[in-house]
Structure formats: C-alpha cells, structure tokens
Image: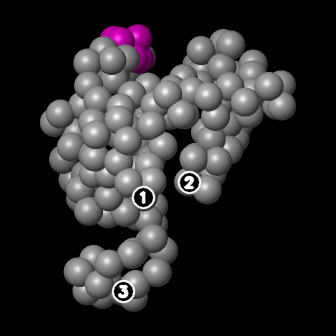
Amino acid sequence: ADTLGMLLLARTLLLLSGPDCVAALVANSSPALNDITHSELLDFVSSASAQDPGLARLCDEGRLICLPSGQPSTLLNLNQTGRELNTWVEKELKQMSDGSDWLIILDGMGRSLESNWMLGSYLKVGVTVLTCAMIKSEINANRLDAEVYDCVVRMNPV
C-alpha cells in the first residue's frame, strides 16, 4: 500500500505543478523485511504506466524517476546513500534556480520515524520534510506520547 500511495502522491504533485517539477521515488537497493526493492519499484511503475497515460508521460519526460537508495535496511541513513542517488541529487541541485524548493517525503516507520524524525532541523532553507508513518512499536509510541497503530504526520519547513 505504501508504494501505491507514494506513486499516486508523486503523480498528483507532478500533474499539479509546473513542467520543471521532478519527483524521484527511492527504494532499497536490496531486500529488507517487506520493503520494496528498486528493481521491484521499476517493475511496479512500468506496470502502472502501462495503465495510466498521464503517469507514462511523466516517466517518458523524465519528471518521475526511480532511484536506488544504496541501502539494504528499513532505516534510511542519509549519510550513506548510494552513488546513483547522490549523483542525481547533485545534478538536480546544479540545475535548480535560486529560490527553488525541495520537498522530501519519507514514508514508513523506519525511514521517517525511527531514523529521520528530526531531519528538518538539519537541512537548509528551501527544503521541507514531510514524514508519514504508522507507529508499530511501544518504544516509538512512548517516545511520541502516542499509541501503537497511531498514524503520525510531521512537516518540517525550514
């Protein structure tokens, strides 16, 4: 469900935005629990694009791409992302005009809640972080003064 939801969100944001907006869906480089891998994500987006001309157009135009995270874990350590993702980010940064904004969306308990909940406090102006997760452990529920299975959403504009 997370993969379909993120694909639909990326598609919607791109269709509502200008032609210079680009989205990258990033997935694990190798299997970890029930997380989708990069190769599975490519297959999924290809299948969805075959059914959705708008999505196919976004992919063909290079406005929606899929990248490997370079990591094998349910967590996301942004200090250890893979070369392909780093190269893409550096290229996009060079092409951005002053005043351009980034929106980073982290979905899932490991990537958003456990390893990057405070990410927004470390980023520069113009980068907003949206974290979305379902709390699945008592430890995280206690840390956030919440209940197990609560859904949490946090936006950190810088």
Residue 76 in the figure: left or right of residue 53:
left
Q: Earlier in the sequence, mark 2 or mark 1?
A: 2
Q: Relative to 76, is 80 above or below?
A: above
Q: Relative to 44, is 66 above or below?
A: above
Q: Kindly indicate the quadrant of the structure image that contains residue 89.
A: top left
Q: Which residue is mark 3?
A: 146
Q: Residues within 10 Å of mark 3 (few under 14, many from 20)?
A: some
CB atoms of marks 2 and 3 within 8 Å: no
Name the residue type under label 1. Gly
Name the residue type under label 2. Asp
Q: Quadrant of the N terminus?
A: bottom right
User: Which of these two is toward me, 46 or 76?
Assistant: 46
Q: Which residue is mark 2?
A: 2
Q: Kindly indicate the quadrant of the structure image that contains residue 48.
A: top right
Residue 108 numbered mark, or none: 1
Q: Relative to 71, is 20 above or below?
A: above
Name the residue type under label 3. Ala
Q: Main secondary structure of the magenta part?
A: helix
Tell me residue 97's x, y (percent).
Answer: 42, 17
- Report the magenta residues as a range: 90-96
Q: Secondary structure at mark 3?
A: loop
User: Which of these two is toward me, 151 or 38?
Assistant: 38
Residue shown at 24%/31% (left/top)? 81
CB atoms of marks 1 and 3 within 8 Å: no
Residue 13 on the magenta span: no
Residue 23 in the figure: left or right of residue 80:
right
Q: Relative to 71, is 92 above or below?
A: above
Tell me residue 16's x, y (percent).
Answer: 71, 36
- From where the camera sits, is residue 119 visible? yes
